[in-house]
Image: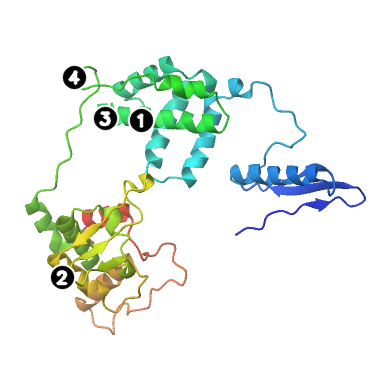
Amino acid sequence: MPKTPSYRRRKGRNQALVTLTDSTTRKRRDYWLGEYGTPESRELYHRVIAEWEARGRRLPRPPDEPTPLRQSETLELSVLLRDFKRFSEQHDEYGEYRSFVILMRLMKKLFGRAPAAEFGPKKLRMLRDEMIRGDATENPPRRPWSRKYINQQVQRIRRIFKWAAAHEMVPATVYQTLRTVEPLKRGRCAAREHPKVGPAPSDMVDAVLPFLSKPVRGLVELQLLTGARAGELIELRVCDIEVDKETGVWSYRPLKHKNAHREHERVVYFGPRAQDILQPFLTERAETDYLFSPAEADEARREERHAKRTTPLSSGNSPGMNVVEIPERSPGEQYTTNAYRRAIEFGR
């Protein structure tokens, strides 16, 4: 962990100061804290450090610099969105960062230079109408969003202003007034309806399975048997499996799941068929290793290609000739949901 800058005395003076470095620009700045050794200067030191950490180690305003009057009324929406983007990059708990980026791009396009404190229900409805219309002139063209997705994006707008109010960037009344806008209802608006996403046909799943690597095929088969989400199963390790000796049922309690932030417990049960799928992945594996590994799938793929090789070993490349000492990209020890999707799409 990076070292916290120290409280120190200015040489030749009885003044305390601390020097901070901006995490983005690497610019350094001295912050004068008052008379060295006094309780007031130490309190100010801790306050400056706390604000620096809260801003992601970006330089805060010097303590002796007066706070602009009614700053929340002059803060542009684009500045608020910039700060929220930095926050969401580090706190993307629900995997919604991409949806926020798409939304903030549209907000900035329409109202980027407007004061953030003036973003009320009228502007929200204007923005929502733009979501319904879409824009064919954008690059790439933005299709009209569906009713449910628009309602979700409006909820995210409220979350942005709730965060801003909690950080004293806008008055809390901005968030409260935005809550008065009712969601779009089916059959009572011009927004298109998106068809419900149903399960993949079993015959299509069966047709794809033979082309998948062993880890990906195991994940697909486990999802079919347990109904678990992909994001839950890719986190599975040997030490996460609990065995009930009386019933013979295996269980798994994922730490990350849809309702983890509500402190709900999630349990995935593995019956006999699921246990048969898991068993080959449990042998010769450390307790903390992930069961489904892209690195293992890549190694198996290379071994299979080598077994099917028709060129004599005396000709062409031999194993190990094209190994790069420090490759730009290498398969990880754990799948992400996107990597899992791509593996199914391309049959890896």
Q: Give the label on residue 148, or none.
A: 3
Question: Residue 321: percent from the left, percent from the top?
Answer: 38, 77
Alpha carbons under labels 3 and 1: distance apart: 9 Å
Alpha carbons under labels 2 and 3: distance apart: 40 Å
Alpha carbons under labels 4 and 1: distance apart: 19 Å
Q: Quadrant of the C terminus?
A: bottom left
* Label 1 sits on residue: 153
In the rendered image, which quarter is residue 342 located in? Answer: bottom left
- The kind of residue tagged 2 is Asp
Q: Identify the residue at image location x=80%, y=53%.
A: 8
Tell me whether the residue at label 2 lies in contact with that at label 3, contact meaning CB atoms closer than 8 angstroms: no
- The kind of residue tagged 4 is Gly
Question: Residue 314: percent from the left, percent from the top?
Answer: 29, 85
Q: Give the label on residue 276, or none.
A: 2
- The kind of residue tagged 1 is Gln
Label located before the other in sequence (2 or 3): 3
Tell me whether the residue at label 2 lies in contact with that at label 1, contact meaning CB atoms closer than 8 angstroms: no
> Dot 2 surroundings within 10 Å: few (below 14), some, or many (20 or more)?
few
Q: Secondary structure at mark 4?
A: loop
